[in-house]
Amino acid sequence: MDSKHYRVRPMEERDLEEVLSWRNHPDVRRYMYFQDEITLENHRKWFSSTKQDANRHLLIFETDLVPMGFANLAVQKQHGLVADWGFYVAPGTEKGTGTYLGKCVLEFAFCDLELHKVCGEILTFNSKSIRFHKKLGFVHEGTLRQHHFDGVEYQDIECMGLLRHEWQRFKGTPHE
């Protein structure tokens, strides 16, 4: 039995430099749409503008009050209670940290925000993230063929979604 305490909390100004260091790490950056390093100045501007948006939820995932990851939920105003999500764990975290992050963020999304659906877009070559989404109960909804230009070539995007009732059913069953 895992005795650690996991939670998500709103991202604060004090988290900026740590989150930026995670985001700029090559192991995280290579799976992003925008793969260039981000400057602290641009990161501060992004945070300042994003925190003003009531439809954006920037979250810090913690294990025993130690920051271990970041997640972003962007509620799509035009689609009601549907949100896109993105996330990453701090490089070097122990195996399984991402699963705890995912479960905490989804619990927040479906219980606290009462969302109807969470959507994820994954670069097709990121097979680890595709497996991760399936492990959490996400369903493959389609492929956007050659949808993202990475500066060298066009990449396919896998679209996955999880409905609230699927999450409720999924979290009540044992998983590896």
Image (cartoon, rainbow, N blue to C red):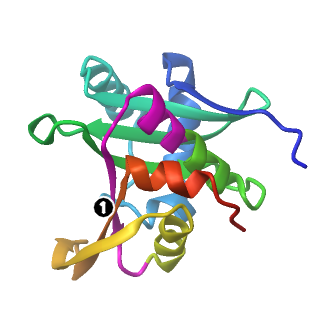
Q: Is residue 148 magenta?
A: no
Crowd around label 1: few <14 · some 14–19 · many ≥20 (10 Å): few
- Residue 131 at x, y percent in the picture: 53, 74
Is residue 65 visible to us here?
Answer: yes
Q: Is residue 65 above or below residue 31?
A: above
**Percent x, y for residue 164?**
39, 47
Quadrant assignment, res 92: bottom right
* Residue 58 horizontal/vertical position (percent): 42, 31
Hey, which residue is sitting farthest left in the picture? 78
Q: Viewer-proximal residue, 35 or 112? A: 112
Q: From this viewpoint, is residue 24 visible?
A: no
Q: Quadrant of residue 122?
A: bottom left
Horizontal side, residue 44 vs residue 24: left or right = left
Residue at x 43% of width, y 38% of height: 110
**Residue at screen point 16% across, 74% down:** 147
Circle 1 sits in a helix, a strand or a loop, which is it?
Answer: loop
Quarter of the rendering containing residue 99: bottom right
Where is residue 15 drawn, in percent x and y? 56, 25
Q: Measuring 64% from the left and 48% from the top, which residue is drawn there?
A: 90
In the image, which residues are magenta? 105-125
Q: The C terminus is located in which quarter? A: bottom right
Residue 120 falls inside the magenta stretch: yes
Residue at numbered disc 1: 33
Above or below, comparing residue 134 to residue 32 in the picture: below
Q: Is residue 41 left or right of residue 167?
A: left
Q: Which residue occupies 31% across, 48% down?
A: 117
Amino acid type shown at disc 1: Tyr
